[in-house]
Image: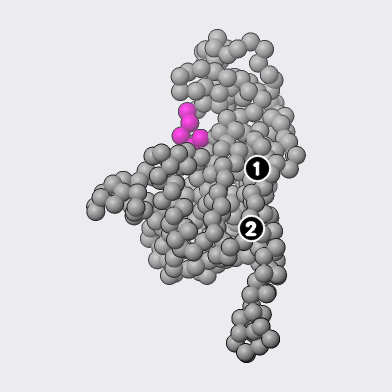
Amino acid sequence: MDKKLKIIDLFAGIGGIRLGFEKIGAECVFSSEWDKHAQDMYEENYGERPVGDINDVNPKDIPDHDFLLAGFPCQPFSIAGKQLGFADTRGTLFFNIEKILEEKKPYGFLLENVSRLVTHDKGRTFKVIIDKLEGLGYTVYYKVLNTIDFGLPQLRKRIYIVGFKDKIHFQFPKPDGTKLTLEDILEPEKDIPSNYYVSEEIKKKRLSKVKPNAPYPSIWHENIGGNISALPHSCALRAGGSYNYLLVNGERRLTGREMLRLQGFPDSFKINVVYTQARKIAGNSVTVKVIELIAKQIQKAIEDNKPKQIYKQLELESIANGTYGS
């Protein structure tokens, strides 16, 4: 690109989406995150503290930008007020994004959310969101991508929604062939503090439920029904998961560094919060590797569209000076 892509980072968490876009040279001009601990970690790593609740920010006060980025929490739509239901997005956090897009008119956006957003209320919730975005004049693309298909050992399906002001062609990234294993992610056992290990009682309980010949290393996952699976990868990190939801080899909890590695953060990314908050933050975060690959595809789509943009400008100029068609 001829100039840096200016981005804003909404519902920023610890800046995973920002980090992915910075890898293609983008410049962040505004960030917003309400959680204090995530703000602390964001500030430690980016040198700036996000503003708080986006509900308290007037869209007019947000700096001009090229791309809006948001890993927004999608709350269930409620039928209230005028009984408009799914014809109205007021009262949801998506409404903030819609108002900012309407006011600032950036060239494009990337939104990320849990994959079940696509099927929520038989797809009606998702249809409202797409209709709203297209109604603002954007060409919209969306796809569910799984972290494990992009080189990191974590099953994590998320919906990614990309939009452009122009009618340009965009393709989501395909797996690039890279593959990290748990051996690449896990820290040496000798370096793990004793307080990460579960009690003998919990270990025995897990061992009694797991199938024999579990792979090593593995992450033991306990589902809602209490069944145990020993897998050569991690199930999705969850902000609200129990302490024993995922156990390395059925013996200990993941460290904060291991969880960030599973999300594709570099080891240079600083952790300055207590473990309970690190678990929550990692579970709420995005996979940086997937975001980076999407950012590269966005960059390519914009670059490929430049000849069309130049032609359109020349056409407008020729109409203006009376030489069009001559």
The residue mark sitting in front, 2 or 1, is 2
Could you say which disc has been placed on residue 169 in the image? 2
- Report the residue at 53% width, 44% height from top: 159
Q: Is residue 102 among what the camera can see?
A: yes
* Depicted 53 relative to depicted 275: above or below: below
Give 94 or 227, whichever is nearer the viewer.
94
* Depicted 307 relative to depicted 98: above or below: below
Residue range of the region highlighted in magenta in the rendering:
238-242
Query: Extreme bottom residue here?
Result: 321
Query: Extreme front residue here?
Result: 326
Q: Which of marks 2 and 1 is nearer the N terminus?
A: 2
Q: Give, as a three-letter code, the residue at label 2.
A: His
Q: Position of residue 26 (x, y in %)?
A: 64, 61
Give the overall secondary structure of the magenta segment. loop
Is 194 magenta? The answer is no
Residue 164 falls in which quadrant of the image?
bottom right
205 relative position to 171: left or right? left
Q: Give, as a three-letter code, the residue at label 1.
A: Gly
Q: Where is residue 189 in the image (x, y as percent from the top left)?
A: 68, 26
Question: What residue sits right under mark 1 in the picture?
Answer: 264
- Report the residue at 59% width, 22% height from top: 220
Q: Is residue 204 among what the camera can see?
A: no
**Quarter in which the N terminus is drawn:** bottom right
- Report the residue at 52% width, 70% height from top: 64
Give 165 or 261, whichever is nearer the viewer.
165
| Crowding near the residue tagged with mark 1, few <14, some 14–19, many ≥20 C-alpha atoms within 10 Å | many
